[in-house]
Image (cartoon, grey):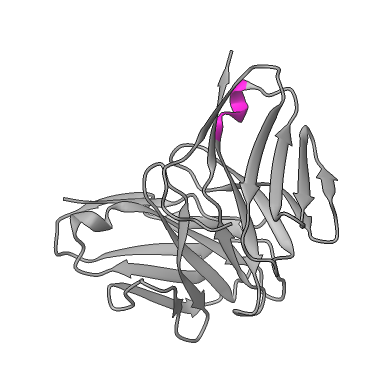
Amino acid sequence: GAVVSQHPSWVICKSGTSVKIECRSLDFQATTMFWYRQFPKQSLMLMATSNEGSKATYEQGVEKDKFLINHASLTLSTLTVTSAHPEDSSFYICSARKTGTSGELFFGEGSRLTVL
Amino acid sequence: GESVGLHLPTLSVQEGDNSIINCAYSNSASDYFIWYKQESGKGPQFIIDIRSNMDKRQGQRVTVLLNKTVKHLSLQIAATQPGDSAVYFCADLLWGYNQGGKLIFGQGTELSVKP
């Protein structure tokens, strides 16, 4: 159990367009989900915490208007990269915590975004 | 751990040898640590975790050691196999942020196993 699915797994878009990435917990409910970004040969950097039914909490330096997060249900969080530019090209990874628990997170397989 | 955007250090070992991967963390309030394995193009996979009330925890072929005095964590892999080649990250849970805390990743180490 505890499977987290991301879609799409990879996407290529033109500069200036917006891209939506979905993160779903398939067999559990997740009140809290997290979005990370990872550049090649670097670590995972936490971008924001996605809270079901409320606004996301962004880490310092992450533009909330650029990276829109919506967590409308207990099994789905979406990250929209608005007006994407080549520097937004990265590997975006989500993770989810089972509702009612603390600590361990379950990770998705990541979504690779390439902006031309 | 605190990710500072540096490039990954690498560790190369011979197949069958033991591997030791180190990690330093900065938050003295952290009380839960996890080691993850990440293969190229995939999300992190949970390997083993340890709470701060323990110094050592063992799994299958892996052992995690925690030294709270110097804020140091290590992952030991016994009889390293080619399938162990990956990037390994330590992560610690930062509490007081929301219920359950948020997970912060360390720099990571790229392990390469030579046959």
Left or right of B23? Residue B63 is right
- Quarter holding the C terminus of chain B is top right
Residue B85 visible: yes
Q: Nearer the viewer, residue B77 or B65?
A: B65
Location of residue B31 with respect to B6 vertically, above or below: below
Counting from the top left corner in percent of width and height, residue B111 is at 56, 31
Counting from the top left corner in percent of width and height, residue B36 is at 62, 47
Q: Tell me if residue A108 is in the magenta stretch.
A: no
Q: Which range of residues does the magenta coloring cover? A: B82-86
Quarter location, residue B11: top right
Q: Tell me if residue B84 is in the magenta stretch.
A: yes
Quarter location, residue B64: top right
- Quarter holding the N terminus of chain B is bottom right
Left or right of A107? Residue A35 is left
Q: Identify the residue at image location x=77%, y=51%.
A: B67
Location of residue B95 with respect to B105 vertically, above or below: below
Q: Identify the residue at image location x=65%, y=22%.
A: B81
Left or right of B89? Residue A20 is left
Counting from the top left corner in percent of width and height, residue B78 is at 75, 27
Q: Nearer the viewer, residue A24 or A42?
A: A42
Q: Identify the residue at image location x=63%, y=51%.
A: B24
Q: Identify the residue at image location x=56%, y=61%.
A: B104
Location of residue B61 with respect to A110 vertically, above or below: above
Main secondary structure along the magenta-highlighted residues: helix
Counting from the top left corner in percent of width and height, residue A100 is at 71, 76
Left or right of A103? Residue A58 is left
Q: Nearer the viewer, residue A55 or A37?
A: A37
Residue A75 visible: no
Outermost residue on the front side: it is: B70
